[in-house]
Image: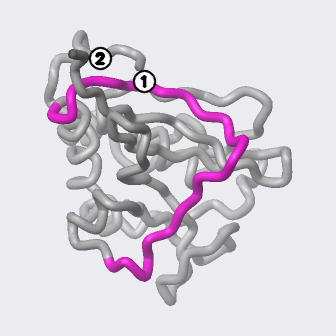
Amino acid sequence: MSETKYTIEARAYDIVGIAAHNFWVLRDEKGQVLGQLHGLATSVGNIIKPIGIIGDKLKFYHFGLRAISFGLNPARNLNFIKAGQQSKPMFSGSPKEVLARWDNAVKALPYLNSLDVAYTPFGIVGIAAINSNTAYHLLGKLMGIPVHRFSLYWQPGWRNAEKILTSSQIESLMYPGDSADVYAA
């Protein structure tokens, strides 16, 4: 009898074949999606937008069945998973191990959203962009798992997590487990 395994995977949402919105997906042992973690452009009226403009904020979201168990309003339960997306399993383990990492990032969302982070519109060249890919990188760090960079896409905001939190803040919010126990799925 094999041990039950849950998986955290990295995914890339294709934006007109040029750029990508990277995000995280939680799957159970049958491959069913339990949750998605995103950073999304959000208007001052708290409306999620496909592309941010000046004045929008980067907000962090948790969607899916696991999110509903955390009290998410089902009306905001969006799905960004599409057929043919690039994806890569990044961490696999027992449900307890995987959910501990996932939930560590989820617990940080209210704090991250309280920071009122400005969204860099259109990943403007020459500016240290802060956008969905920045959120993806930061959330991966908080889960203590490897962060995959997808090939073939422009990914503005990649590796700019320190533009949201300092290295010491990130370290204080990271999953407390030993990084030696991290292994790719």
In what element is the residue under mark 2? loop
Q: Which residue is mark 1?
A: 146
Which residue sits at x=42%, y=24%? Answer: 146
The numbered mark at residue 89 is none
Q: Residue furthest top?
A: 180
Which residue sits at x=64%, y=42%? Answer: 12
- Which quadrant of the structure image shows residue 8? top left
Sequence order check, earlier mark of 1 and 2 = 1
Q: Is residue 76 magenta?
A: yes
Distance between the Cα atoms at labels 1 and 2?
8 Å
Q: Position of residue 184 (x, y in %)?
A: 41, 17
Q: 112 above or below 146?
A: below
In this rendered view, identify the residue nearer to me: 130 or 69.
69
The C terminus - image quarter: top left
In what element is the residue under mark 1? loop
Q: Amino acid at mark 1?
A: Pro
- Which quadrant of the structure image shows residue 179? top left
Q: Is residue 23 magenta?
A: no
Q: Which residue is mark 2?
A: 182
Q: Which residues are magenta?
A: 73-96
Please say whether residue 10 is visible from this viewpoint.
yes
Q: Position of residue 144 (x, y in %)?
A: 30, 29
In this rendered view, identify the residue nearer to me: 166 or 155.
155
Question: Is 166 left or right of 123, judged from the image as shown?
Answer: left
